[in-house]
Structure formats: C-alpha cells, structure tokens
Amino acid sequence: MRKLYLPIFFPLALLCCTVLLQGCSKADEETLEGIWERVNVTDIDSDLIEEWHFFDNELEIYQYQIENPEDLTLMDFGSYSLKNNLTNQELFLTDMGDDRFNGDWDVLTLNNASMVISKDIPGEILYKEFTKVVHD
C-alpha cells in the first residue's frame, strides 16, 4: 500500500513547489517593475542622482544633477530577469556595458518601497540600495 503513494507523492510535491515559486516570481516581477532611485550610501550629499528603470525585462540606468532632473544621461543598459530559488531570490543582469553588473545579484530586500541587492565579484562586493520612485 505504501509503495503506491510514493510514486504519486513526490511528483505532486514537486509540481506544487514549482507552482508556488512561479507565483511568487510574478508578484515580485510586478514589484520590481518601475523606477528605482539608488541611495548613495558612500556620499549622502552628492548632487548626482542615479535611477534604475526596470521595464519589460529591460534595465536602463540614468544619472542626472539634482537641480536638473529633466536632463537624464543614459549610463548603461541591458536585460534582466528575476529568479526565485528555494532559499533566495536573484536578479540576473545581462548585456550591461559595465561587465561587473552582469550575472546574478542576491536580492536582500524587495518590496513596494525599497530594494537592496548585492553581488560578489573578485576583490569586492557590489552593494546597492534603492527607493522606489512614485510619480503622481
């Protein structure tokens, strides 16, 4: 009798986990989509603002002077995807001009107000904090 349930249980459990992970991914993708302003943790008095624009799996990074927000300068661009694993979430960047940005970033925080990501590269850890830009 037990042997009958095992072949059914494991595929069913795997299917449930897959559906749950994909469901979380869709909601998180919607949360990620939009404009994020990078918090400059190394120079809080900087007059330069950096925005990361996440739309339709394309990422564009802009920079502008705080006194002239309409004058955006495109600094880099590429593609992105969000991946959910069993233990963590990753933001995968590709085709970026700055090769250090390409690859998997650990998503430490992602909600409607803030995002924190980090990436280990040889010799350093890239760490980025963001706040979501809300336009009226």
Image (cartoon, helix red, strand yellow):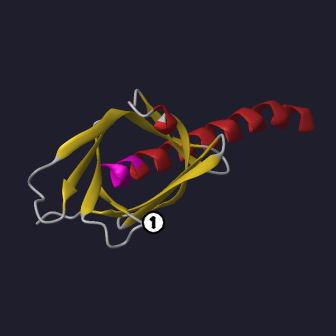
Of 97 and 130, the residue lying toward us: 97
Of 124 and 117, the residue lying toward us: 124
Percent position (x, y) of residue 98? Answer: 42, 34
Q: Quadrant of the C terminus?
A: bottom left
Looking at the image, can residue 41 be seen?
yes
* Residue name at image x 60 percent, y 51 percent: 125
Give the magenta range: 29-34
The prevailing secondary structure element of the residues shown in magenta is helix
- Residue for badge 1: 42
Residue 105, located in which quarter of the rendered image?
top right
* Above or below: residue 128 compared with residue 77: below
SS class of the residue under badge 1? loop
Percent position (x, y) of residue 119? Answer: 57, 47
* Above or below: residue 46 compared with residue 17: below
User: How many dots with numbers?
Assistant: 1
* Above or below: residue 34 compared with residue 37: above
In the displayed structure, does residue 72 sit left or right of residue 77? left
Looking at the image, can residue 35 be seen?
no
In the displayed structure, does residue 118 sit left or right of residue 41? right
